[in-house]
Image (cartoon, coloured by chain):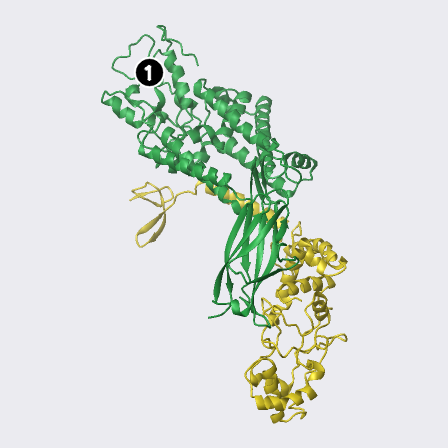
Chain colours: A green, B yellow
Amino acid sequence: MDTSAPNSDATTVTRIEVEAVNAPEKRNLYKAREAIYPKNVHGKYRKLKWFVLVLTLGIYYLIPWVRWPRGPGEPDQAVLVDFAGSRFYFFAIEIWPDELYYVTGLLIIAALGLFLATALFGRVWCGYTCPQTVWTDLFIAVERIIEGDRNKRIKLDRAPWTADKITKKVSKHAIWLLIAMATGGAWILYFHDAPSLAADFFRGQAPFTAYFYCALLTFTTYIFAGSMREQVCTYMCPWPRIQASLTDEHTLQVSYKVDRGEPRGPHKKGDGWEDRGDCVSCRACVAACPMGIDIREGAQLECINCALCIDACDDIMAKVDRPFSLIGYDTDANVELRKTGKKPRFQFIRVRTIVYGVALVIVAAIMVATLMTRATVNLSITRDRTPPYVKLSDGAIRNAYTLKVVNRDNIERSFRITIDGIETADVTAIGEDFSGENDIIMAGGDGARTLRLFVTMPPDAVTTSSMPLVFSATDVVSGETAVKNTTFLSGEK
Amino acid sequence: MTVSENNNEIDDFTGVETTGHEWDGVKELNNPMPRWWLIIFYVSVIWSIGYWVLMPSWPGLTGYLKGTREHSERENVDVALAAVNAERSVQMKQLLSVSSMTEIERDPQLLEYSMAAGGSLFGDNCATCHGAGGQGFPGYPSLVDDEWIWGGSLDEIRQTLHFGIRSTHPDTRLNIMQAFGRDGLLTREQISDVTEYVLDISGQDSDAEAAARGAPLFAQQCTSCHGVDGRGNQALGAPNLTDGIWLYGGDPSVIRQTIYNGRGGVMPFWTDRLTDEQIVALSVYVHSLGGGE
C-alpha cells in the first residue's frame, strides 16, 4: 500500500452497496445463506496473509516429501505416523505407542501457545493460520482470478446461464476440486512412505483407507472452503466461544476506533472535517469482510480478526487524506483512554500473559528435558499370579517372572540382567543358561525381548511371606540401566 | 388473540404461529425446521435408499434381501480367519522342522511364538482341569512343580499330550493303582500299616510300630511300581511317595483311601483334536510353566 503523504486534492469516496449479511439480526436458521462477495484489498495485512498462506500450505503439502535417513530397516520419511509399525517419526525423534505422553505434551504446548497468542493479539490464529481461513482465502483467490472481483462476481451470479458463465463456473469448481484433492492426497502421505504411496495411489493399488481418507478430506476441503466458508466459523467452531474468556481489555483486536470515527457520514470533496468523525460511511470494510460483518459494530463472535478491513479502510483514509488506522489493531482499554483524553498505550505484560507464558515455558522445558533424557531401554516384570508361588518336592519355594526388555535403539544390544534382594536364590530361565556369568541376553534393535525367569529359594532362606526383589537390565556397552521392583512371595506367615 | 392465515393462534411474545397443541397451558410454536436440519434429513433419506439397494436390509420370510454388494459380515470373518490361519501355518510348520524341541526354546522367536500359541491353547483346552496357571487341583497334576508322574521333558509332555493317560487311544499311557482294600488284596489293618509306612518314608509323623509292620507289606505289594525306596518310576507312571508333593493329598486319611480304592485319573488324548504343530507349541508352553525337566 502506498503511504503517500496527505495531499490537498483528496477524491470523493463513493459508498459501496453492501450489507453485513452475517450479522446476527440478518442471519436466520430457516432461510438460505446469503452469499458474501469479499472485495479484494491491497495492503500490508493482505501481504502478510499471502505470506502466511504460502508458508503454511507449503509446510502442509511438502513435509511428507522431506527425507530423513535413519539407517537400514527404518523409514526415511521425516514426519511419519506409522500405524502399522506403531511408531511416530518426527525428524530425529521416534516415539513408541507407550510414549504417547510426548504427543500430549505437544498438544498442551499448542494449547498454551494458542492461549498466550489470543491473550496478546486476539484471534490471530483464526485470522491468519487456521486451515479454514487459509483454504477459504485460497479458494476466494481462485474465484476472483476466474470470475473477477466483487462486482463482477455479483453480476455473474445474477446473469442467466450462458456459455461464458458455465465455463467460468465449471473451471472454478474444477480448480477448487484439484486443490481439495491435493489436500486430501497430502494428508494420507503423512501415514505412509510418500513416494511409494503416491505411486500406488495413481496406479490404483493403494489400500482402501488411503482412497477413503483422501476422498473424505477432498470433500471437506471442497465443501468447507468452497460453499460453507464463514458458516464453519460462525456455527461449527467452538473457538469463537472459548476465546472470549482468554481476552481482556488489553488484548489487541481488530477494532473500529469508535472514538475517532463517530459521528460518521458521507464526506464530499472539499468539505471540512470539523464536528464529525473520520468514518465516511463508504462501507469498504464491510465489502472486504470475508465473514460478512460490519466491524464498526464492535467486537463480534463472527469476526476472525483477519485484518482485511484494516487494509480496506487505510486505502480510503489515504484517498480522503486522513490518518491511517481508523480501523486497526487496538484495545478496549485504549478506547477508554482516548475518550478521557489520555495517551493510548499497549500493555502486553499482564497477569494473564505472564501465567500463560510461564506455563508454556515450564511445559516446554519438561518436554525438552524428558526428550533429552529419554530412556532407550525399558524393563517390565510380570510375576506369575496363578499360582503366586510353587512349593517344590524338596520344600523350596519358586516364583516365576516374565521379563520384557524393550530396546528402543535401532541396533541389537546386550543387556545384563541382575536380581538384587535375594542372595541365596537360584535363578534359571527358559532357553538360556542363566547362571554365573551368563546373565546377558540379546535384544534386537527397535524391539523387545521376553524372558521367563524362575527364582528358587531353599526352604531355610524363606523368612517372610513377601520379600522385595529388584530386577535390572544394564546395557553392557553404554551402561544404561532400567530398574523394576517386584516381590518374591512364599506364603510363609 | 391474533390469528394466522391458517386460522391458528399467533403467540404474542414471539409473533410466531402456534400449532394449536396445548399442554397445561404450554403451547407449541409452529417454527419451521432449521435448514441445516432439513438438509441432513433429506441426505439421510437419500442415503438410506442407497443403503437398501447396496447392503442387506429387509428381512423376508425365508431369508433376507442381500443387497447388490452381497455384503456378509459372517463371510468376512471367515475370510479374515482363513488369512490369519494361512499366515500362522507358516510359523507353525517351523515348529515341526526342528530336530529337537529344545531348539525351540533356544530360539527367541520360535519360543515367543510357541508361548503365544501354546498359551491360548492351554487356556482353551487344559485350564479347565489343570488350572489357569497350570497349578493343578487334587487329582489333577500340577504342571508348575518339579514332580512329574510320566516325565516332564519336552518329549514326554508331547507324548502325554498326543495319547493321554488311561485314555481310549490305543497308544495311551496306562497303569493301574489297584484297589487293595476293595478287591480284598489287603485287610483294613494291613492298609493302615502300609499307610503309616508311607507317612514314614515321606517324612511325616507316623506310628513307628505300625510302619514297621507295613514295611514288608509295602515291599510285597508296592515296590514293583513305586520302587524299593518308594521313589516311584516315571517309565511306569508311578509317583514318588517320599517327597512333599501329592496328587490326591498326603494326609493319612487320603493315603488310606488311595490304597483302599485305588486311583485311575484320566487325561484325554489330543492327537485327533489338535494338530501336531499345536501339540508342540502346547508342550513348550507347559514345559515353560516352571515344572519342565
Type of the residue with mark 1: Pro
* Quarter of the image that includes the N terminus of chain A: top left
Instruction: Give how far across and how far down residue B208 sits, in percent.
Output: 57, 88
Q: Residue at x 40, y 12 (%)?
A: A3
From the viewer's perspective, tell me whether residue A147 is left or right of residue A411.
left
Number of other residues with Cα within 10 Å of mark 1, as a class: few under 14, some 14 to 19, many 20 or more: some
Q: Quadrant of residue A31?
A: top left
Up-down: is A72 above or below B268? above
Q: Nearer the viewer, residue A199 or A162?
A: A199
Q: Give the chain letter at badge 1.
A: A
Instruction: Give how far across and how far down residue A109 sits, in percent.
Output: 44, 37
Q: Quadrant of residue B62?
A: bottom right
Residue receiving disc 1: A266
Q: Nearer the viewer, residue A41 or A488?
A: A488
Up-down: is A16 above or below B83? above
Does residue A361 show up?
A: yes
Q: Nearer the viewer, residue B86 or B166?
A: B166
Q: Residue at x 37, y 14 (%)?
A: A317
Q: Residue at x 52, y 69 (%)?
A: A460
Q: Nearer the viewer, residue A188 or A229?
A: A188
Q: Residue at x 28, y 44 (%)?
A: B1
From the viewer's perspective, tell me whether residue B31 is left or right of residue A433.
left
Instruction: Give how far across and how far down residue B111 sits, in percent.
Output: 67, 57
